[in-house]
Image (spheres, helix red, strand yellow):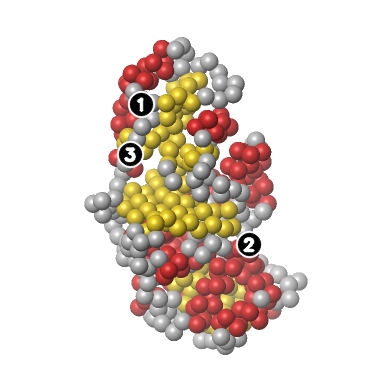
Amino acid sequence: MAKVAVLGHGVVGSGVVELFHKNKHSIESKAGQPMEVKYILDIRDFPNLPYSDRFTKDFQVILNDPEISVVAEVMGGLSPAFDYVKSLLEHGKSVVTSNKELVAAKGAQLLHIAREHNVNFFFEASVGGGIPIIRPMHQCLAANEISEIAGILNGTTNFILTKMIHDQMGFDEALKMAQQLGYAERNPAADIEGHDTCRKICILASLAFGSHVYPNTVHTEGITKLTLEDVAYAEDWGGVIKLIGRARRLPDGTLSAGVFPAFIAEHSQLANIDDVFNGVLIRGDATGDVVFYGRGAGKFPTASAVVADMIDVAKANTTSKSLCWEDSDGNQVVDIETVPFSFYLRLTSPRDESFPAAVKALIPEAGELHRKNQPADEWAFVTPAMPEQELKKLLDELLRPGDKLLTRIRILDY
Ligand code: HSE
């Protein structure tokens, strides 16, 4: 019999407890033993639930109960989650979590503590919601050298972009819908400013490349500056705009990592991942590209991954050897401005046809884009691949008083 505890009864935590009740029989048969939720930690009272007797407000009760072998941390945030998880591992209890902020900030340390105490720290639900991605990466793709990961990793922003692209819905209305559907973070700035995607690509990159990639080393842009005009130019180019988290191993062993909106060609597998769905492309030297697709946020998809981890932990009798990476000083991640990309540029200039002529004099391979109702003083181009630091120098040369760069978006080729 595995007695388990759940820390937090929010969107994901309530989903975990409900899944345990709903699918009790199949969960227990897969775990090979009875499993029971003995405690649910929350500061609130839930008197009308069928399992209201399991609630406690005292973490110490869970920490000091020798019957508890597995704990799901689904509170989110770093404090008190980090202290709780660390103490639980040190007390010989395995922990599973959906908390990407925790894993991205403290993963190397917590994995090390888990190893020292011969328990497990699993976090399948921290990336891609219900999509199996962590376990396939360190188990099924174990024979590969992974060279690159690129993904749509945030359901909220993908939902918003989809509504903007297909329904011409405004940004604020789409965000509100994503919040009502339980996709968004408590503070949705983490979604729309790209930090949630950043945490997820850090987790995947740490696992793929073996050393901790810290979020503050990864260039991060969100979607708040995107406009329907940019969406229209992307369509003229032959694609859509997606918020992408990307990490790539460079030939000298360093990493290029970043989170940014990108033009993605309409024939790419990533272009057709819409709504709350996430998609992650992993490039292995043996497999080539493998793409994972599914619901990236929401109560039950995320709870599904948490419960699966709890089942695996209940079955395990030792620490996973493959789910690990080393700590790092963060110097393995290079400055993104040194990495070449093609760029889409939207500019305004009071100059007439002399403006595109000036652009082409500086960047001869620049291609022009057009949209319906394009104002006479608005111009859009795509550049050949170049490091952003070079692009900035060219723009300094180009732009005169009255000219303005409105948007610059990277172009990816998947
Ligand atoms: N806010 C996150 C998202 C939740 O929208 O993807 C799942 O991590």
Relative to the observer, which residue lies in front, 41 or 408?
408
Pointer 2 residue: 299
Instruction: Give the answer, above or below, for where 227 lies relative to 117.
Output: above
- In the picture, measured across the screen, residue 14 lies left or right of residue 112, that is right
Q: Secondary structure at mark 2?
A: helix
Residue lying at 48% horizontally and 74% vertically, measured from the top left: 95
Relative to the observer, which residue lies in front, 261 or 371?
371
Residue lying at 55% horizontally and 18% vertically, measured from the top left: 375
- Gap between marks 3 and 2 measured at Cα: 39 Å
Q: Residue furthest left?
A: 252
Among the two numbered marks 3 and 1 on one chain, the one whose residue lies closer to the N terminus = 3
Q: Mark 3 or mark 1, which is nearer to you?
A: 1
Among the two numbered marks 3 and 2 on one chain, the one whose residue lies closer to the N terminus = 2
- The answer, for residue 165, to whether it is visible in the render is yes
Q: Mark 1 or mark 2, which is nearer to you?
A: 1
- The answer, for residue 80, to whether it is visible in the render is no
Relative to the observer, which residue lies in front, 91 or 217?
217
Residue lying at 61% horizontally and 54% vertically, measured from the top left: 183
- CB within 8 Å, label 3 to label 1: no
Q: Secondary structure at mark 3?
A: strand
Disc number at residue 365?
1
- Gap between marks 3 and 1 measured at Cα: 15 Å
Pointer 3 residue: 340
| Amino acid residing under circle 3 | Pro
